[in-house]
Structure formats: structure tokens, C-alpha cells
Image (cartoon, rainbow, N blue to C red):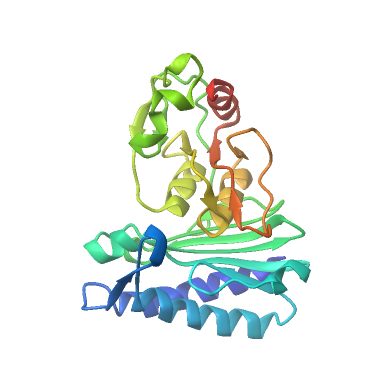
């Protein structure tokens, strides 16, 4: 798996070089059908480069990406790449620097290697199962926060609507926001924030890499029903995600309806 992680790191850095060539430029953009958000020619160029490079290096691995039309072929593969070429496309379009490349390899539904790379911030988060998580080669650890009160939680405002929570009362956390789900997870793994949550159906490519970074930094990750995240599903979505310091994670999911 060390070789797989090295492959992802090299690919992420190449993706960063390609994407930054479009940043602050006039990259053509479109709106995806069905309200699925925007896509730019940068997303498509990075997707094409990653797909060609990674599947050539590991021809037996399946492929799942936000920007590639999905097929059932990946379901027959023991290992599968799960990729978001640019996570935070809206931020990319708006000129924010907090977009990322999110790359993961799952084996039989479990993420084994992961990279989240923010080229404009020169931040490369990496993890291999059983080997810890790093930021620019420095070991990471989640925060020690255990109490919901005053915990810093990365989430959109919509996640704190009363109907998600027992007694119709959202917990008294300090809510913060970053547009990239992959970056939110990486920040929790870094210990800069205590937890993150998203309670809507969540695409696998948004969270696969970041979930391993949190776990390998000593955190806990589940869907909103407390079930462990499993990847490469026929419909590549999870029932939300809650991630954070172990006791805080448990305190949050206990309050969910």
C-alpha cells in the first residue's frame, strides 16, 4: 500500500500543476444537469489526466470519479480509485484558494490510501491504513475535544436545522465552513477543527480520501446513522458523514434524529 500512496501523491502534485494553469484564468464553465453544480474545463482536464495516468499504472483497479460517467465495471474490481478532480469547484471559479484534489484507493469497500492536496496553499495531506496521517510529512492527530459545547464543527448552516436533531434542538457548537468536503475532513485530521458533519446524501468522491485521513489521525468516522463508511457502492453515495475526535463524534451522532 505504500506504493499506492506514493502513486497518489505523485498524481496529486501533477494534478495541482495542471489545475493552477487554469486558476484565475478564463476557464470555460458549465452547469451540470439536475442542479448538480458547476464544472469547468479544469475539472475535466484534471480528470482525464488522472484517469489515464492512474489506470495505466494500476490496470486492474476500478475507476470512480465525479467527472467520469460511471459504469458497473468498477463493482467487479477488488481495488478502485475514488477521485474528485477538483473538490470545491465553486471556490475555484470564485478565486478562493481552498479547492483541493481528492484521491483515494479503496480495497473491498475500505479506503486504504488517500491524498487531499491543496496546491494553492501547498498543503498535502496523506494517509495509508495502519500507517498514520501526515500534512507535508508531519504526523497528524485529531483534537482532544470531547464536549459538544463550544466544539468547532465544520458544516453548512443547513445541517443545524432543528429536524435533524433530537428534541428539535441543534447542539451548541461553534460552526465554521469550508466549501471542500475533502478539506473539511483534512482539517479535522489536522486537529485545527474538532469535527465535521454533512447530513445530506454524500458522494463517495467527496469524502473517501478525507475519511481515512481522519481515521489515521486517531479520529472516528461514520455515516449519520453511526454505520462505518463503505465505499464503491452501486450508487456511490453515503448517508451523510460525521467525523471528529472519538468522544465528540459519538456525542454528535447520539443527538441526531
Q: Residue at x 58, y 49 (%)?
A: 211
Q: Nearer the viewer, residue 121 or 248?
A: 248
Looking at the image, which residue sits at the far front? 34
Q: Nearer the viewer, residue 63 or 183?
A: 63
For residue 175, above or below residue 207: above
Marks counted in the figure total 0
Q: Quadrant of residue 171?
A: top left
For residue 127, above or below residue 154: below
The x and y percentages for residue 73 are 71, 74
Q: Residue at x 35, y 32 (%)?
A: 175
Q: Quadrant of residue 6?
A: bottom right
Q: Residue at x 56, y 22 (%)?
A: 251
The x and y percentages for residue 5 are 63, 67
Q: Nearer the viewer, residue 183 or 109?
A: 109
For residue 202, above or below residue 219: below
Which quadrant would the N terminus be assigned to in this image?
bottom right
Left or right: where 20 falls relative to 74? left
Left or right: where 62 falls relative to 246? right
Which quadrant would the C terminus be assigned to in this image?
top right
The x and y percentages for residue 100 are 41, 62
Amino acid at each position: 500500500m505504500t506504493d499506492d500512496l506514493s502513486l497518489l501523491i505523485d498524481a496529486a502534485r501533477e494534478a495541482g500543476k495542471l489545475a493552477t494553469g487554469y486558476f484565475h484564468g478564463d476557464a470555460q464553465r458549465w452547469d451540470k444537469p439536475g442542479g448538480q453544480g458547476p464544472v469547468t474545463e479544469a475539472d475535466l482536464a484534471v480528470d482525464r489526466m488522472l484517469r489515464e495516468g492512474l489506470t495505466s499504472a494500476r490496470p486492474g483497479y476500478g475507476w470512480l470519479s465525479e467527472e467520469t460517467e460511471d459504469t458497473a465495471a468498477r463493482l467487479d474490481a477488488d481495488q478502485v480509485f475514488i477521485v474528485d478532480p477538483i473538490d470545491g469547484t465553486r471556490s475555484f471559479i470564485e478565486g478562493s484558494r481552498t479547492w483541493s484534489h481528492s484521491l483515494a484507493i479503496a480495497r473491498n469497500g475500505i479506503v486504504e490510501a488517500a491524498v487531499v492536496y491543496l496546491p494553492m496553499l501547498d498543503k498535502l495531506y496523506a494517509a495509508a491504513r495502519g500507517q498514520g496521517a501526515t500534512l507535508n510529512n508531519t504526523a497528524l492527530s485529531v483534537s482532544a475535544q470531547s464536549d459538544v459545547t463550544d466544539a468547532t464543527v465544520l458544516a453548512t448552516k443547513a445541517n443545524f436545522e432543528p429536524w435533524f436533531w433530537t428534541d428539535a434542538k441543534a447542539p451548541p457548537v461553534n460552526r465554521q465552513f469550508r466549501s471542500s468536503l475533502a478539506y473539511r475532513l483534512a482539517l479535522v485530521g489536522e486537529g485545527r477543527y474538532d469535527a465535521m458533519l454533512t447530513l445530506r446524501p454524500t458522494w463517495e468522491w467527496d469524502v473517501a480520501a478525507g475519511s481515512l485521513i481522519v481515521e489515521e489521525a486517531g479520529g472516528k468516522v461514520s455515516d449519520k446513522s453511526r454505520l462505518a463508511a463503505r465505499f464503491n457502492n452501486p450508487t456511490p453515495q453515503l448517508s451523510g458523514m460525521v467525523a471528529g475526535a472519538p468522544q465528540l463524534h459519538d456525542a454528535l451522532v447520539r443527538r441526531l434524529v
